[in-house]
Amino acid sequence: RYVGLSLVGLGVSVTVVSAGHPLAWLRQTRGAGSFQGWYYGSAPSTKLYYLKDLQLDAAFWLCLLLAVGFAVWLFRAKKTADALSAAAGFALTLGMCLWNLLYCLLSASPAGPAGGAQALLAALAPALAVRLLLAGWHRLKKAPGVAPVAAEKPSRPRHPAGWAVPACGLVACAALVAGGAGQLSARANGRGADYRYVAPLGGWLGEQAAKLETETAIAAGKTVWSTYASALEAMTGTFQPAGTDYIIHVLGDRQRLNYLQQFQAGGFDLVQTPSYKVNPFERWSRNANWWFYRELYRYWQPVGTTYACGGMHIFWERTGQDGALDTGAAVTVTQDSPATATLTVTAADPSFCGVADVQVSYQAAVASGFALRGGVGSFLQAEALTEKQLCEAAGRESTTCDFYIPADRTTYDVPITIENGVGVLRLNALPADAASVQVAGATITALYTDWEYFYE
């Protein structure tokens, strides 16, 4: 009955949330690319690990300890009510532990979310404390040698539960009042002269207020395609034309194609991308989503630099022509080891700075008997060596330049940034002691101006 009610509840809620289009919701959800475990992450330590590397916090172990306690209680229970309570506690605590482990295994992350376990403990701890107090009270009353207190007149028996519930409620209300007062005080007193009221957002902002004002002026009377929807969309009341408000989500192959086709169809004036200077993860996003950015680099160019556009984003406008450059270049492949191959792009002009669109042909394999979740045997990390050197020279974070490509394909398009005529990208098969990659060849399909690294 529980499973049946859950399915009915899911169907009703999805129908309501999707405005009567549950099948469209299902297609969107199923097309979110949950099979693309290679997409997220940049460093090997956040992508691949062994079970001994799992980072399980105190909340996980406390839930596991409680699950053991509930199991003992369940088998020792003599009353149906006690057995039901123990079974419910066992299901909740063990389920939270299993969810944490499942998240780690399915997302290839060594640390799972601790919020759920912490919230469960926050609710269970006072309930168990009250239950233990009541159990102790009853045992004390039944203890031999303890004479019951005679009542002078018949009255309603006093019970600890009579004050426990309202006491907990008063404590919760006091915490809410104190927290709310602190938040209001911080917002009321923290504005100062550096904060401005932004009417379309209904709140106060610091330096971002002036930047948003600049961006709003740039986009005035124009439609904008944002790779990452932000305050601009909230202020103008617009939404991403593709229906997917930012492409850092794992889009499945069909959704990627739909996103790209709608982008190519046009019908908008500007493209907005986060500035890689302000948001370091934009460097990863450009490389991981090269299937989109190669189209952007080819037919669009920035209206101006980040700081001319408000300091948070880059606005692009269509050029009306093919932006592929005539500068010649060649790519060579060096097989450094069974698990590593280096791609080096050399431009004909030794002073050329830009980015090469390279199609790589490769074959990844994994040792017999070694397999990760879902049958995936390996990850292929693309280490952007030239980009990392540029970031380190500028004093910026360099780990977000790296990205991953699928290990179960034979060809894939990657960007290789070129500085002073040379660009280097290294493919690393993970785990190095069990996986290998063989690069059969690489072809440069186009060269573009790299606005973000050299002209921003």
Image: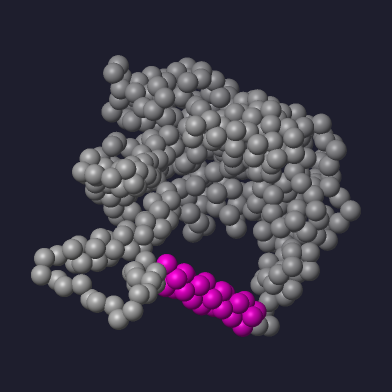
Q: Is residue 126 magenta?
A: no
For the point 24% across and 63% down, which residue is it?
Answer: 138
User: Of all residues shown, which one is farthest toward the front?
Assistant: 153
Image vertical order of residue 132 relative to residue 229, above or below: below
* Secondary structure mainly formed by the magenta segment: helix
Image vertical order of residue 128 relative to residue 96, above or below: below
Front residue (pair 13, 399): 13
Q: How many marks on residues?
A: 0
Front residue (pair 423, 387): 387
Judge from the rendering whether residue 337 lies leftward or rightward of residue 303; answer left or right.
left
Judge from the rendering whether residue 312 lies leftward or rightward of residue 438; answer left or right.
right
User: Residue 85: x and y, percent?
Assistant: 34, 47
Image vertical order of residue 95 relative to residue 121, above or below: above
User: Residue 258: x and y, percent?
Assistant: 71, 28
User: Residue 241: x and y, percent?
Assistant: 78, 40
Q: Which residues are magenta?
A: 165-191
Judge from the rendering whether residue 295 lies leftward or rightward of residue 265; answer left or right.
left
For the point 55% across and 34% down, which residue is it?
Answer: 5
Front residue (pair 328, 55): 55
Corner quadrant of residue 205: bottom right
Front residue (pair 1, 291): 1
Corner quadrant of residue 348: top right
Q: How is the image coloured?
A: one colour
Q: Is residue 226 visible?
A: yes
For the point 35% across and 43% down, which residue is it?
Answer: 84
Image vertical order of residue 164 relative to residue 321, above or below: below
For the point 55% across and 49% down, which residue is it?
Answer: 281
User: Residue 377: x and y, percent?
Assistant: 38, 24
